[in-house]
Amino acid sequence: MRMMNTDLRAEPAATATENLPAVELRGVRRTYGKHGTAVNALDGVSTRFPDAGWTAVMGPSGSGKSTLLHAAAGLESVTSGEVLLAGTDITAASDEELTSLRRDTIGFVFQNFNLIGSLTAEQNVALPLRLGGQRVSTRDARDVLASVGLADRSRHRPRELSGGQRQRVAIARAMITRPAVLFADEPTGALDSSSAKSVLALLRDMVDTSGQSIVMVTHDPAAAAWADSVLFLSDGRIVDHAHSPTAPGVAERLAALEV
Amino acid sequence: MLRLSASTFREQWQLFLGSILTVAIGVALVQSSLLILVTAATLEAPAGLSTLERAQLMDSYALAIPVVGITLALALFLTIFIVSSTFAFTVAQRRRDLALLRLTGGNRKQLRKLLLGEAALLGLVGTALGVPLGLALMRLQSQLLVMFGFLPAGFRPGWQHWIFAVSVGIGLGVALAGVLAASRRAGRVRPLDALRGTGDEARVMTASRWFVGMVFLAVAVALIIVAQSVDPSGAMPLMMLVTLAAAVGLSTLSPLVVPVFGRVLGLLFRKHTIGTLAAANVRDGVRRNAATAAPLIMLVGLLVGLLGTSFSSTAASEQTLHRDTAADLVVTSPADEAHRIPGVQAVANASVEVDVPLVMTNVEHEEDALGGAMESGNARVVDPDDYLRAHRVQPVAGSLEQLHGQAVALGPGRSGELGYSIGDTVHLKIGDRQLQLPIVAVLPTTPYGGPDLLLPKGIAPESVLPSATAQTFVSTVQGADPAAVGDNIRTAVPGTVDSVDAWVQQQAAAEQDTQLRIFTVLLGMASLYALFAAINAVVVITAADRRSEFAAARLSGLTRRQVVRMAVLESETVTAIGILLGGVAATGTILGMRGALERMSGVGVVELPWLAIGALVAGAFLVVGLTSLWTARSATRMSPISLVSDE
């Protein structure tokens, strides 16, 4: 297997702008296991995820996509290297610091939604602010739900919603804190294609109209095609980088990686 | 945050209902025993009784106090054990939810606050149910005590206002304590855990779990060693502590054993799909299976351990009584008729022994609450030479030869407990006669007990004799047929004549009867509580944990009936684990008691209550099996696909 693009130190074009990158990784290495059987999930990754941009991360299974996302979001510590989130070095951040980051600076969306089943849509959405000790008016939560197209579903519990609706509740929950970066791990992985399309359109709209930064891990070339750029990972290294991707183009590069 | 608790409560009500009920029953048990204890301890004998009657009445109450006191201690201990294991388990069940809270910005403190707040709420609701339940239970318990003769008829424990504060304190305290360690562990949940697996902790055997388990087992072993050097009467309460410590230790370490049983089940059902699946479930659900086994370990340990201890000590006293009795026949007759027995043909020796009740005044002791420094006792008036021929006993100090005139010997009943030694003077009152007698001999303590004091003939006033009963130990002359001699005695003296074998058996049966009453009071409620906890664990686990797992099993091709069979098989395996580990705890207890008995009497026996064990094992399998059947059926009632796709 050989990469098509020899630019190993892929640098997204957006770094040229005056803005700080939303997330920057510098020589990040993440090793699992002990010396003999050590596996490098991330093998010296350096990259910048641009502010107000949407970056998709792709790669074969086991390429380190999820580890990259977890490391960038401070969910997982790195073995060496540095992680900068919105300009702050979080490599050695304490649990308290990471908690407050999760409250104010970052949001998460997952394949399996991870909503709290016992809370209504609006309670789920308000939860991050409540955990941050803020009083949240029902109105605020409903406004955010309305912005994801679920104004009439605020009193429903997750199980009473379709997959696409659940994922939009999850996005609303992530967005209520107005995070600097939204991390999405296979956000359309559990959705049918029309639900997936509406969720991706919502994310696209957030980037275009309010300059939201998004880092998204996905398997799906069609989903990746909605992003501004695509990073390709293989064996824990960045092996390729595409701008203004198209679904067939992404599929082709991915297929080349999986040979 | 409270809203989150409230809505979690609505969702997982079985989880919380179980917690509330465990608190409620615990509070009820403790409150009931405490109220009975307080009332029994402040009982006053009615006016107008003689000193002796008063002392005897107070003595019968005094027996109720340790019995109810131990019941109280046991109730408190079980409450702490069951509530904390239930609460810790429910926290472990919600690990994924908690990790999700961390992911959405909750910090450790908030998680702990949430869990402690919930625990406080559940504790208070549990207490609110427990207080009235405790009053009902108190009525039941005191009826039992009256029925068994531990307390006088008409005994009515009263309500005390302060008990409310105590009950609230206990309900709140055990709930908070139960969740404290678990909440600290939950605080360490990593947000990433929300994205992985079922949310259960990967490692069940944490370092602290190892430590706690080992400490409790070490305590159990240490207590067994200590018990080897105390009297059996003192060893008995120690054995209860051994059982408790061993049961806690084994419950804590049970996750080590669970996978082994899973493997055994797998081997037994090698060619059986459902069996293999159940075996895999046993190995996989180590935490939930350990949580179900814990109350069963306690139940079996307590019941088998203590009943076994009691049966063994009764067997030891039967054997030693047989060994120490040199006579062929025992005649029970009115005291003033017994003097005719030695004259019956073919009687070689007759030791006429008359029981007289008396009051001992202990001048060295301070006045205490139980009617001053007086206690009732029983003395046996004997002829020392006849006595030595009828009983194979030797004093540990002094000599029975000197038991003539104004003298007393400490009998085998309570010789160690009374606090006298040879040469001391005993102040006592028989009938209306006050006596001060020097102790000339001390007999060894025996497993079968006996009188507190031995008195020489002629010392008791004639007035007490007509109402007294004599036991006469008769040896027949060589070659005579004891049965024929017995017939001769029967014609000469009104009363009953038993062969020594029959008499020993009667004594043992009476002792067994008393012990069974004590253990019924002690263990009755506690056993039901432990059984409830086991049922609760099965219900909670199935309701909270396994719906989607069952649904997935059905989607992969199992019929509903097969899923239910799989669940029942798994539960029965866990029951077997509980029974076996409980059996280990009980074995330690019984062997410890055997050592104590052997050291004292030279007779080491183990007698097991097989009937009770059989009933217990069958009952545990039946109850857990039925609960599991019912919960698995209701968990699989809905169509599987709706459960798999559920959040």
Image: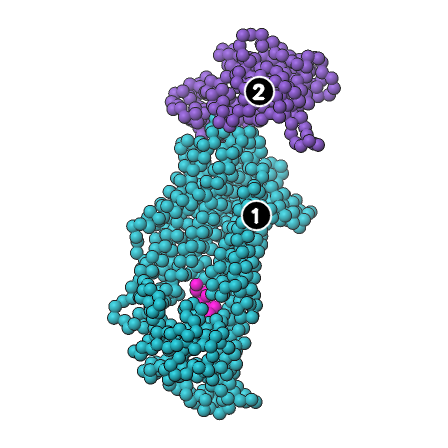
Chain colours: A purple, B cyan
- The stretch in magenta equals B509-518
Q: Which residue is mark 1?
A: B253
Residue B564 in view, yes or no: no
**Residue found farthest to the right:** A1
Q: Are marks 2 and 1 on the same chain?
A: no
What's the amino acid at mark 2? Val
Most foreground residue, B359 or A52: B359
Specify whether residue A65 is painted magenta: no
Residue at x 38% of width, y 24% of height:
A135
Query: Given the image, what chain letter belongs to the residue carrying mark 1?
Result: B
Assess whether residue B511 is covered by the magenta stretch: yes
Residue in front for this viewpoint, B312 or B417: B417
Q: Which residue is mark 2?
A: A83
**Which label belongs to residue B168?**
none
Crowd band around label 1 with a 10 angstrom C-alpha radius: few (<14), some (14–19), many (20+):
many
In the rendered image, residue B268, in percent from the top left (x then y), is placed at 66, 50
**Residue at 39% over, 83% down:** B405
Residue at image x 40%, y 33%? B2
Q: Position of residue A132 (x, y in %)?
A: 43, 25
> Neighbour class for label 2 at 10 Å: few (<14), some, many (≥20)?
many
